[in-house]
């Protein structure tokens, strides 16, 4: 009974993580101080190709998963592809409805909230053991192969996306730097805190690669 309860808890972490992360990504855009690197790429691509944020993120996810599969000589995981499309579609919906337009909070405050939400959402998704975001999965693979710290490999991927997106006309600002520094450094500490507060461990679905990540 206790095992089933823990599994149900982990299953709830996944949709909660996706929604929290999407809200954070939307607030990055709303702050008008620069969005997260992936959305810099997605919004830059939208300047040249008629796609949505969801489709752009799904394309990035597919490329990351293909690289991971080729590197590990395994079949590509499909759940991260759904995560990127799901989160991107929620971001599209939030941008359309713009629920934060009447918030009496200055842009720096909105940006601080965006950093915390994106980091916390990423932590919840990883802890759920399902649909780990493709960029995180690629970063973990790089960490395992090269023995680099997780924040370094994740930052390298996102810095590359940021650069490509900026060259295509995507928005770039202090918020983008805050994402690269704040979110990437907060994910692991938040996982540790969550493990104690909600008493949910990282499952072994992916061989628990996150346990081996060095800070």
Image (tube, helix red, strand yellow):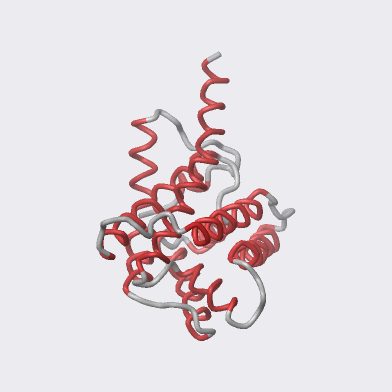
The residue located at (50%, 37%) in the rendering is 13
Question: For the point 56% across and 71% down, which residue is it?
Answer: 42
Residue 69 spot, x, y in % from top left: 69, 59
Q: Position of residue 101 (x, y in %)?
A: 38, 60
Residue 145 x, y percent position in the rendering: 54, 61
Question: Which residue appears at 36% of the width and 57% of the height?
Answer: 114
Of 95 and 153, which appears nearest the observer? 95
The location of residue 110, given as percent across then percent down, is: 31, 59
In the image, farthest residue toward the top: 1
The total number of labels drawn is 0
- Please give left or right for residue 40 compared with residue 66 in the image: left
Identify the image quadrant of residue 168: bottom right
Say above or below: 52 vs 124.
below
Q: Is residue 103 above or below residue 48?
A: above
Q: Quadrant of the N terminus?
A: top right
Residue 161, relative to residue 139: is it above or below?
A: below
Q: Which residue is at 45% across, 47% downward?
A: 20
Of all residues shown, which one is farthest toward the bottom? 167
């Amino acid at each position: 009974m206790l095992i089933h309860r823990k599994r149900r808890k982990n299953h709830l972490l996944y949709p909660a993580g996706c929604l929290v992360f999407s809200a954070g990504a939307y607030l990055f855009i709303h702050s008008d101080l620069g969005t997260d690197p992936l959305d810099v790429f997605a919004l830059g691509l939208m300047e040249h190709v008629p796609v949505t944020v969801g489709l752009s993120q799904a394309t990035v996810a597919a490329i990351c998963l293909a690289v991971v599969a080729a590197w590990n000589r395994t079949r590509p995981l499909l759940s991260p592809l759904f995560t990127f499309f799901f989160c991107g579609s929620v971001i599209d919906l939030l941008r359309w409805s713009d629920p934060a337009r009447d918030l009496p909070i200055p842009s720096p405050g909105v940006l601080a909230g965006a950093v915390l939400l994106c980091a916390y959402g990423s932590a919840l998704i990883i802890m759920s053991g399902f649909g780990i975001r493709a960029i995180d999965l690629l970063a973990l693979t790089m960490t395992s192969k090269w023995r680099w710290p997780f924040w370094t490999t994740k930052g390298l991927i996102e810095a590359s996306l940021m650069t490509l997106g900026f060259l295509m006309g995507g928005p770039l600002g202090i918020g983008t730097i805050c994402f690269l520094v704040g979110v990437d450094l907060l994910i692991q500490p938040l996982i540790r805190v969550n493990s104690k507060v909600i008493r949910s461990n990282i499952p072994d679905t992916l061989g628990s690669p996150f346990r081996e990540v060095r800070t």
